[in-house]
Amino acid sequence: MTIKINLRKIYEKMGQQYNVDAWWNKETPFEIIVGAILVQNTNWNNVQLALDNLHKRQCLSLHEIHTTNLCDLQTWIRPSGFYKQKGTTLKQIADMLVLEYKSDIELFLKNDINVIRQKLLKVKGIGFETADDIILYAANKPVFVVDKYTIRILSRIGIIRKNLKYQAVQDLFHENFPKDTFLFQKLHALFVSLGQNACKTKPLCDTCCLNSICESNLKNLFSPT
């Protein structure tokens, strides 16, 4: 089968297994930006603790992040881990939005995808995944977010090599699916759901909706015991 057929089959099977319709909350674009930065190298439960701290101190707006003392900000987001680096990143992106866009977040997000991406990548602590996360969810523009779950699942199935570069993996989706924001949001949510529930670091192949097409699972089935 072609890569396109395989990717479509994966999408269909994951969609039958997981309901991700309620995956998106009603955060403001800036709250989405903050969450995308805080979730780096941690899980959402830890991020939620950090966000709760910011809410309590009324420090979850562009103005407050921009004006708050860095040490205080780092203390409040400590539950998310790597709090010193993440605090600095939050301050830098807030400074960029205030100084270059006069605090008009919507103006920034109206830019072309490539412009937004390059601006974000210039902020220390923001890589391809975080930048694309912000583009997909805060700007609502069609770009597929490649995360550790995507790499893990596709490499175990046998579609990609585990060390394939970010852009090459993203190109697979951009070339084989229509560039649709909601579709890419749903695809990303499905990969996360499968990665967290079945295709874990130690996979639970018996519960995985992709076990019939997964090379790793088939190798386990037919390997000598």
Image (cartoon, helix red, strand yellow):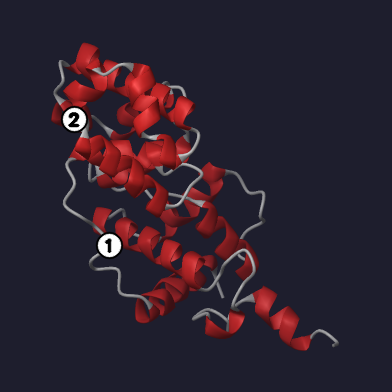
**Which of the 4 image quadrants contains residue 8?**
bottom left
Q: Is residue 141 left or right of residue 201?
A: left
Q: Amino acid at mark 1?
A: Trp
Tell how many labels.
2
Residue at the far top in the pictured view: 99
Could you say which disc has been placed on residue 61 in the image? 2
Q: Is residue 19 left or right of residue 37?
A: left
| Secondary structure category for the residue under label 1 | loop
Q: Is residue 51 left or right of residue 4?
A: left
Find disc 1 in the rendering and name its residue: 23
Q: Amino acid at mark 2?
A: Ser
Q: Residues within 10 Å of mark 1 (few under 14, many from 20)?
A: few
The answer for how far apart the CA atoms under marks 1 and 2 are is 22 Å
Using the rendered image of the protein, determine whether residue 125 is visible from the camera's viewpoint: no
- Up-down relation of residue 109 to residue 44 (above or below): above
Q: Residue, x 33% and y 48% (percent of image)? A: 48
- Up-down relation of residue 44 to residue 90 (above or below): below
From the top left corner, tell me how far across and down residue 191 is, in percent: 44, 64
* Label 1 or label 2, whichever comes before in sequence order: 1
- Up-down relation of residue 18 to residue 89 (above or below): below
**Which of the 4 image quadrants contains residue 96?**
top left
From the top left corner, tell me how far across and down residue 54 is, in percent: 26, 35
Residue at the far right in the pictured view: 224
Using the rendered image of the protein, determine whether residue 202 is visible from the camera's viewpoint: yes
Q: Residues within 10 Å of mark 2 (few under 14, many from 20)?
A: some
| Secondary structure category for the residue under label 2 | loop
From the top left corner, tell me how far across and down residue 208 is, in percent: 52, 80
Q: Residue, x 15% and y 15% (percent of image)? A: 102
From the top left corner, tell me how far across and down residue 116 is, in percent: 31, 29
Q: Nearer the viewer, mark 1 or mark 2?
A: 2
Could you say which disc has been placed on residue 210 in the image? none
